[in-house]
Amino acid sequence: MKILIAAACVALLAIVFYVSRGGPVQAPAGRNDPAGKDISARPQAGTWPTYHGNYSLDGVADSTVPDAPEKLWKFKAGNRVEVTPVVADGRIHFTTAKGGLFALNFAGEQIWKTASEDSFSSPPLLVDGKIVLGTGKGMLVAVDAATGKELWKYDVGGSVQGTANRIELAGGKKGILAISQSDGSIHGVDLETGKGAWKSPPQQRCDGSAGVGGGKIVMGSCAAALHVFSIEKAEKTSDIPLGKDNEVAGGVAMSGTTAFAGTRSGKLCAVDIAQDKVLWTNADGSGEAFQTPAVGDKWVIFGADDGKLHGINRETGVKVWSFDTGNRPLSPVIAGNRVVVSSGGTLFVLDLEKGTKLWSAPVSDDISSPAVVGGMILVGGDDSTVTAFGKK
């Protein structure tokens, strides 16, 4: 069995980068709080700090979007933009395939640009005035978001595929986590200094991103399980098996004490991490479901490699609607009563309740998953551009 799982994990390599391409009005204090303290798992309006919105990776935006968005601007970066832009403090940040890192204003004008000798292997995290990125050589790099100046480097000891994420360290220090892709070990790093605070024992290969909420870190792995860690004690509290062929290579979305993750078999699992049990499993997907689901109060939206996006009743796990995107849908976003999703090179806006298409537009041959901030939609493209859509 271990051999079969190892083989399956190796097979995931070809699509790992696809997974990584994949946020919001201030919530009541404590909702999805990363460490049981109010450090805003749902950041203030006008921010999108990870590829899937807030630190819980639930993909819920701060506003709705127009039913028929208009193209506001298109910025030419000179190289492929394969990862979702991140946003805070009036700046849009994104990376390019060959190590470029950019800052734009909301009008699509360049503020600064830097270039790295190493490629960036993870989606960026934008937190407390810093951009944190993993590199192909296993370094975690922090850059000043206002100037582009490098602040520190930390050696993870292996490639970082998933996004870094925000946590609290002992003594109230600001911290981040990063996962070593090859062995699934989690590193807790001081955000200000870049020095390691703790490191977990190896788990299993992890190609996705960990969600953070309620004082817990939750990651999936090639062991077909979710692994739950206490941030306060910096230790693993449980492994929750998801069943045969349910390896997780995408991000884990958190909402309260419930974690949501798609799997290699196309299933979507809802897991209660407080009681260490699977609440329900939806099997409407076909092929791998390695995007990060969007999780609202009543809905969970997820897609799989069969091209279909599904609207699931959050309470029961029962499918309410399906929409065929015609390609591989990436990590969707819930924006008010709308769903925004990228598939291939096309951007879609759907009705959340019905799953019907309201609008679509071709953007490039291939685009990133969307960021949605203040009614504006941002996507990167393999034509070396970032495009903004909204209402003029």
Image (cartoon, rainbow, N blue to C red):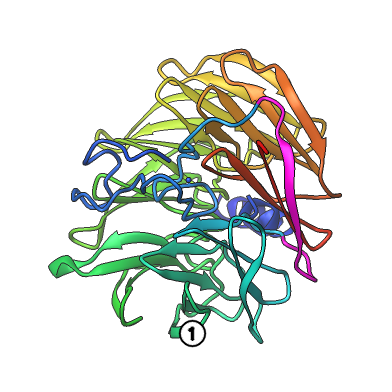
What x and y, as percent, mark residue 88?
46, 58
What is the secondary structure assignment of the residue under circle 1?
A: strand
For the point 13% across and 69% down, which residue is it? 171
Quadrant containing the C terminus is: top right
Instruction: Reply yes or no: does residue 361 show up in magenta.
Output: no
Is residue 185 at all visible to an observer of this figure?
Answer: no
Q: Quadrant of residue 11?
A: bottom right
Q: Residue 115 or 105: which is nearer the viewer?
A: 105
Instruction: Reply yes or no: does residue 78 show up in magenta.
Output: yes
In the image: residue 85, left or right of residue 177 = right
Is residue 55 at all visible to an observer of this figure?
Answer: yes
Work out which residue is located at the far front of the displayed protein and give it.
Answer: 392
Task: Tell me: residue 184, above or below residue 119.
Answer: above
Span of residues in magenta: 67-81
How many labels were placed on the picture?
1
Write down the residue under mark 1.
150
What x and y, as percent, mark residue 355?
65, 18
What x and y, as percent, mark residue 197?
26, 76
